Amino acid sequence: MKRYNGMKLILAACLVTAGPATAASLNGAGATFPYPIYSKWFDAYAGLNSVEINYQSIGSGGGIRQITERTVDFGATDGPMTEQQMFKIDGKILHIPTVLGAVVPAYNLPGVEKLNLSGEVLAGIFLGKVRRWNDVSLKALNPDAKLPDQPITVVHRSDGSGTTYCFVDYLSKVSPEWSKTVGLGTAVNWPVGLGGKGNEGVAGLVKQTANSIGYVELIYAKQNDISYAAVRNKAGKFVKADTAAITAAAAGAAKTMPKDYRVSITDAPGEGAYPISTYTWLLIYQRNPGETGKLMRDFLKWMLKDGQGMATELGYAPLPESVKAMVAKTIETIK
C-alpha cells in the first residue's frame, strides 16, 4: 500500500511539471535557426534569475502549431505567421524580433574552397535544372574553380521550417520560375533532393555527402565546419554571410519596420548586404494566464538589454537600435 501511494505521488509530480509554465518556468518550442543563441540565453537567464526556460528545437512549423494550440507559453519562428494562421489564434499574438541571422548555401565539394552563386543559379539547382557541378552557369560564376563533372546532390528541410521560408522567400524574389512553380512557405513541394530534419539534419547530410549542397543557418555551417558560398546580392556583389553583411541587409528595413514586425529583408539593397538574411521572432500572446506574462516581460527586457551582446559571437546580428526601441514598448503590452 505504501508503494502504491508513493507511485501516486511520483505521478502527481510529473503532472505538475508538464504542460504550461509553473511559477518559475516557461515552456517554448519552434525554430532550429536561433536555437544556439536561445540555448545560451536561457541558460544565462536561469543562472541569474532562477527561472527555467525549456525550449524544444522542432522547427518553425511546430512552433506555430504549438503556440496556436496553447500547448506552450511561447513559440519561435523564422517565417512570420500568415494572415490565415493568425486568424486561427484565440487572442492576439505578438511577433517579437530577437536577433537577425543568415541562411547560407552549405556545400561539400572536395577541392573547392571558394564558391560563388547567384539567386538564379541557386533556383536552378533546387529546381533540378542545374544538375552537375561543371554546368556552364556555375563555371561562369566560378571561372577559377576546379568544378568536378559530378551530379549535384540537393539537400533540403523535411519539416516545416522558417529557414526554408527565408530561403524560398529569397528564391521567389529572384526567380520568376521558382515563384510560379514552387512558391513561398515554411514547407514547399521540393522538385528534387533529400530531406533532413532541422538545421542539424541538413548540416549532417551535407557534411557526409560529397558533391552536395543544402541550406542552413550560418552558425550550423560554422559549428560543423562546412563550406558555404558567397551569394550575389541585388547590387551585383558577391557577399559571404557574416554579422556585418546581415546588419547591412537589415539597415533599410529598420527605417520602415511595421508595427507588427512581420518584415522580409531578403534580397535587400546595398553593396554590403547579404541577400539571404532574416529576422527571427518569438511568438507570444499579449494576454497570458497567471504569472506567464510577467515572466515573459522580464525575460524579454533582459534579452534586449543584456542578451543582444551575446549574438555576434554565435554568428547572429543584434537588433538595430531603432527596432530595439520599438520592441521595448511592445514588451510592456504583454500581460
Image (cartoon, helix red, strand yellow):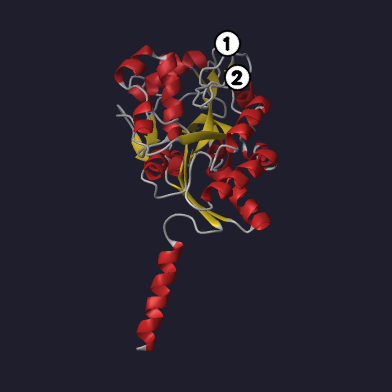
- Kind of residue sitting beneath label 1: Ala
Q: Which of the 4 quarters of the picture holds residue 50?
A: bottom right
What residue sits right under mark 2 in the picture?
A: 273
| Contact? badges 1 and 2 (CB < 8 Å) | yes
Question: Which residue is drawn at the image coordinates 51% and 15% (left, top)?
Answer: 141
Whole-angstrom CA distance, mark 1 to mark 2, is 9 Å
Q: Position of residue 94 (x, y in %)?
A: 49, 35
Residue 92 vs 48, above or below: the answer is above
Task: State how many labels appear.
Answer: 2
Question: Residue, x 62% and y 32% (percent of image)?
Answer: 329
Q: Locate residue 192, reporting x and y percent.
A: 31, 29
Say whether residue 76 is visible.
yes
Q: Is residue 42 above or below residue 183?
A: below
Q: In the structure shown, which secondary structural element does the residue marked by tag 1 occupy?
A: loop
Residue 253 sits above or below residue 235 on the image: below
Q: Amino acid at mark 2?
A: Ala
Residue closer to the observer: 211 or 236: 236
Q: Which mark is drawn over residue 225?
A: none
Expressed as whole percent of the image width and height from the top left, the position of residue 155 reads 39, 34
Which SS class for mark 2? loop
* Image quadrant in which the N terminus is located: bottom left
Q: Residue at x 34, y 14 (%)?
A: 177
Bin the neighbour count of mark 2 within 10 Å (Cα to Cα): few under 14, some 14-19, many 20 and up. many
Q: Which residue is mark 1?
A: 235
User: For the view shown, which residue lies furthest in the bottom direction?
Assistant: 1
Picture quadrant of residue 313: top right
Query: Does residue 243 appear anywhere in the picture?
Result: no
Q: Earlier in the sequence, mark 1 or mark 2?
A: 1
